Image: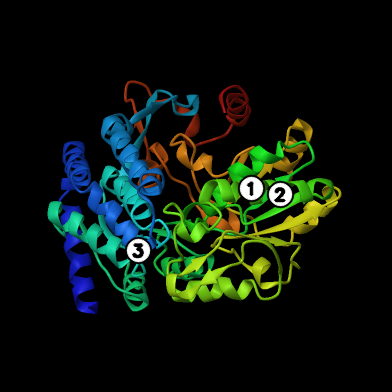
């Protein structure tokens, strides 16, 4: 495998050097081929996701195929505009000149996709990599074999491996891929693996995008519409069985309204999934036995007030609400990444600061309140990747907003035009005119310092 990866990388680098991928026409043809086969195989994609997760068709369209199709349509529509050199205002310091930004592909790109949204989080970065004019190797997750096999089938059926290809395998294959010198690496996954990726990339000074996660808080004050907040939190938390990097990880609620809120959220879980969520066709399962046991262990030392039922044979964990766990408990140590929602209370803003400050900067931040001063206080006080006021997760759906983390929750952002920009280098170009040459910058400098300072004041 080591030799085959070396050969594959050599072939992709050789193909990139031909300059073929820099043609916008070539990129558009590739994107249109991808769109055609995706449209043809959409039902196959939904079936693969169901086999891997028991994910309903509605959730598959909402969180996987719908997003990919929208990104692909946007890229096809806007690529010529995005790729065109942009003229910017020239500095008088360089008079006379014309200044431009060229969007240059990085070269050969590695995309490592996660298991939680195995189709969408492989294909959206791929759309950006193709749009940007790169050659690409996609490494899908080994934990979702049905979806990963389908991704490989789709890609190999329309692309030459010198342009875009798929490499499948487990941890050893990922390690082998990361040992190579890439021109760009795009990784989505856990913080712990993200650190491994960053370390490997640093060996070659390879630029990276790291889409990670963290414990994303959801703050609810006494002015919030509790029933509506509960409905929106149930949707955001239990979508994909809670296996979403931007799901609300825990709630911090004003102590005086906690009891009412728990009743609201219990009712909303029943409305969404019925009295027995295990029988709901809309409720997905945990990805594998390892993660099932990891999540079940979190329930050993906490007070469960809603849900808590588990079934290992079906990889089922009910939508579960946990009351006032210790910050040192298993459920509060790391990102939960499952259908367990802890509820903590606060009396004042200092309590909120203490709880959130206990963790690294989160990927997302949610606020439910009708108090604008409280909302602005939280938005300005805390650092996080992105957030929503009075809803959850919907910021992910606007391609005009860059999606990404900060600090421990990630590096870089993408979606829409931002995906294209992620996979291209902004190359600054000045075209200097020859019709005049202002002599002040040339030696000897005697007697010129005053004129230079005045020039900087006026035009610098």
Q: x, y percentage for residue 400?
A: 46, 34
Toward which corner of the image does residue 220 lie, by quadrant? Answer: top right
Q: Nearer the viewer, residue 402 or 80?
A: 402
Precedes in sequence: disc 3 or disc 2: 3
Instruction: Kindly check if marks 2 and 1 are in contact, taking CB atoms under 8 A apart as contact.
Output: yes
Q: Does residue 454 appear in this view?
A: yes
Q: On the image, numbered disc 1 is attached to which residue? A: 267
Count of numbered tags: 3
Q: On the image, numbered disc 3 is attached to which residue? A: 52
Q: x, y percentage for residue 66?
A: 35, 41
Q: On the image, numbered disc 2 is attached to which residue? A: 263
The alpha-carbon separation of the residues under discs 1 and 3 comes to: 29 Å
Q: x, y percentage for residue 160?
A: 13, 56
Instruction: Kindly check if marks 3 and 2 are in contact, taking CB atoms under 8 A apart as contact.
Output: no
Q: Does residue 212 appear in this view?
A: no
Q: x, y percentage for residue 256?
A: 84, 47
Residue 416 vs 52, above or below: the answer is above
The alpha-carbon separation of the residues under discs 3 and 2 comes to: 33 Å
Find residue 394 and name its label: none
Toward which corner of the image does residue 452 lie, by quadrant? Answer: top right
Going by the image, does 25 lie left or right of 120? left
């Amino acid at each position: 495998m080591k030799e085959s990866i070396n050969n594959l990388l050599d072939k992709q680098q050789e193909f990139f050097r031909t300059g073929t991928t820099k043609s916008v026409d070539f990129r558009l043809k590739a994107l249109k081929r991808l769109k055609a086969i995706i449209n043809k195989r959409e039902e196959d994609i939904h079936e693969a996701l169901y086999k891997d997760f028991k994910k309903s068709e509605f959730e598959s369209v909402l969180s996987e195929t719908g997003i990919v199709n929208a990104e692909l349509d946007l890229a096809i529509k806007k690529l010529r505009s995005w790729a065109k050199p942009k003229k910017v205002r020239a500095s008088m310091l360089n008079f006379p000149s014309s200044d431009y930004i060229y969007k240059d592909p990085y070269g050969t790109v590695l995309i490592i996709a996660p298991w939680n949204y195995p189709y969408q989080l492989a294909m959206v970065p791929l759309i950006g990599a193709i749009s940007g004019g790169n050659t690409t190797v996609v490494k899908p997750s080994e934990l979702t074999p049905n979806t990963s096999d389908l991704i490989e089938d789709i890609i190999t059926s329309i692309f030459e491996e010198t342009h875009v290809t798929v490499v499948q395998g487990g941890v050893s294959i990922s390690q082998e891929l990361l040992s190579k010198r890439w021109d760009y690496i795009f990784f989505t996954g856990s913080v712990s693996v993200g650190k491994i990726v960053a370390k490997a990339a640093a060996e070659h000074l390879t630029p990276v995008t790291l889409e990670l996660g963290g414990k994303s808080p959801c703050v609810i004050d006494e002015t919030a519409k509790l029933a509506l907040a509960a409905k929106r939190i149930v949707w955001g938390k239990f979508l994909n069985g809670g296996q979403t990097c931007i799901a609300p990880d825990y709630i911090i609620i004003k102590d005086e309204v906690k009891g009412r809120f728990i009743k609201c959220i219990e009712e909303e879980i029943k409305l969404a999934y019925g009295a027995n969520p295990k029988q709901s066709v809309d409720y997905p399962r945990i990805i594998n036995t390892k993660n099932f046991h990891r999540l079940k262990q979190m329930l050993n030392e906490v007070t469960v007030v809603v849900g808590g039922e588990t079934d290992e044979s079906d990889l089922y964990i009910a939508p579960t609400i946990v009351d006032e766990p210790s910050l040192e408990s298993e459920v509060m140590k790391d990102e939960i990444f499952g259908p367990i929602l802890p509820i903590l209370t606060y009396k004042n803003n200092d309590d909120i600061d203490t709880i959130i400050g206990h963790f690294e900067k989160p990927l997302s931040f949610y606020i439910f309140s009708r108090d604008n001063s409280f909302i602005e206080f939280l938005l300005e006080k805390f650092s996080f990747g992105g957030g929503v006021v009075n809803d959850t997760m919907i910021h992910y759906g606007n391609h005009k907003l860059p999606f990404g983390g900060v600090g421990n929750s990630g590096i870089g952002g993408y979606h829409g035009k931002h995906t294209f920009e992620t996979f291209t280098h902004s190359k600054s170009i000045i075209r200097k005119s020859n019709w005049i040459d202002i002599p002040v910058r040339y030696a000897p400098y005697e007697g010129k310092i005053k004129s230079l300072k005045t020039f900087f004041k006026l035009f610098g």
